[in-house]
Amino acid sequence: MSSLCMLSDDALLDRLQQAAFGYFVDTMNAENGLVPDTSREHSPVSIAVVGFALSAYPAAVERGWMERAEAVRRSLLALRFFRDSDQSGSPTATGYKGFYYHFLDIHSGRRVWRSELSMIDSAMLIAGMLTAATYFTADTAAEAELRELADLLYRRVDWHWSRDGTGTIRQGWKPESGFLHYGWEGYSEAIVLYALALGSPTHPVSTDCYAGWTATYQWENLYDQDFLYAGPLFVHHFSHAWVDLRGVRDPFMREKNSDYFENSRRAVVVQRRYAQLNPHQFVGYDCNCWGLSACDGPTDDQPEVANEPRRLFGYAARGVPYGPDDGTLSPPSVLTSVPFAPQLALGALRNVLMRHPEILTDDRLATSFNASVIDHNGQAWVSPGHYGLDQGAVFMMIENHRSGWIWRLLHGCDYLVNGMRKAGFTGGWLDPLVTVEVHS
């Protein structure tokens, strides 16, 4: 059993949050401020992970885990890199039209893996830049430069171009073939993307673009829960890392008499009920062992495991209830559910830590485990290393649960607020007369 299970909820969350923050401290390239996708050797940079890092530094300063000057220094390294990066859109560039390729070489900052120019990952990077700019407001040369760079980098993003003349924002673009053949359609983590695209003072999308996206939503009743469907848990989390969606409603949610925060709570209930029913009879699934999300997983070619009962998917966006599902669960996705359903999330996390203490290394959660696939020591398969997206989401969602501090900070980001208003969000904290309570 992990010793963490003996701690109080607050002490447990403090340890896990500080360990998650340590990922950025331990892995950042000291030359350019870039952060790798994973802790594995030779991992490329994920631009979204850099966005999480930029968002985590201010909260770490508030918690006393990093000196303010050090946080500014790290932030400036990244911002200066992106300012000076190759924006030609060539196959070896860093970006184009203010967007960036999904994966970059950690040393040169150039595109790797023939990855796409990613609209959603660029949005999370920009959200991190704006988080830093909203926090670092001191009258110093370094913090003034930080604010100016964040503003410059946001303003140069051509969100309008990313529509490619279609009804919604496209998911990506490649120099070899142009825009990908699919857009942001169906409910996804893209609220932050659309809010930033709508709020742009230079190259915004029009409001019909957001309405076009919500028109593709799929409202369902699953296990007696009426909710806006998305199978993987991360979809119900990522925009909430930055955007306070408690009690605010866009036209779609007003019609359904719900909001996105409540919808994420219902997604937790759906996940829990699915695991309890366990339709594919995977080892360990029950009401306190759930968490299907985008994560690493074992593959069919696993010479180090002793049994392979079913087809295995490797890295995949696993989801409930329509799959894919191969018995792989994501502990970080359970922990990032804590703002929506604290008792359910912490109960499940403690249960998994008691059953599988091997998922924890230096208080940092592995991205996934699969108890239906055992190694030669008789232990559940555990993904090696750590993923930056998991650690960033864990850090931010614990902070939002404990204090609401990141949410309140971004109430003061005019670009984000304007984008939400243009999307049609009203009520809650967007009404200046309303005070939003924070429950620790």
Image: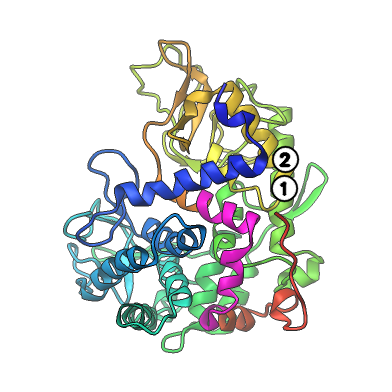
Residue identifier under label 1: 341
The residue at 61%/60% (across/down) is: 187
Residue identifier under label 2: 344
The furthest residue to the bottom: 201
Quadrant of residue 362 in the image?
A: top left
For this view, does 69 lie left or right of residue 167? left
Percent of width and height locating residue 350: 64, 31
Badge 1, how many Cα within 10 Å: few under 14, some, many 20+? many
Q: In the rendered image, is residue 248 in sight?
A: yes
**Span shown in magenta:** 394-416
- Asked whether the residues under the numbered discs 2 and 1 touch, taking CB atoms below 8 Å apart as contact, a structural biologist would say yes
The residue at 19%/66% (across/down) is: 93
* Residue 396 is a magenta residue: yes
The residue lying toward the viewer, choosing from 348 and 18, is: 18
The residue at 45%/63% (across/down) is: 55
Which SS does the magenta portion mostly show? helix
Considering the image in quadrants, where does the N terminus appear?
top right
Percent of width and height locating residue 417: 59, 80
Percent of width and height locating residue 416: 54, 78
Instruction: Determine whether 249 is above or below 390 in the image.
Output: below
Quadrant of residue 105 in the image?
A: bottom left
* Residue 364 is a magenta residue: no
Identify residue type, mark 1.
Ala
How many numbered marks have been drawn onto this rendered protein structure?
2
The secondary element bearing badge 1 is classed as loop
Q: In the rendered image, is residue 334 in sight?
A: no
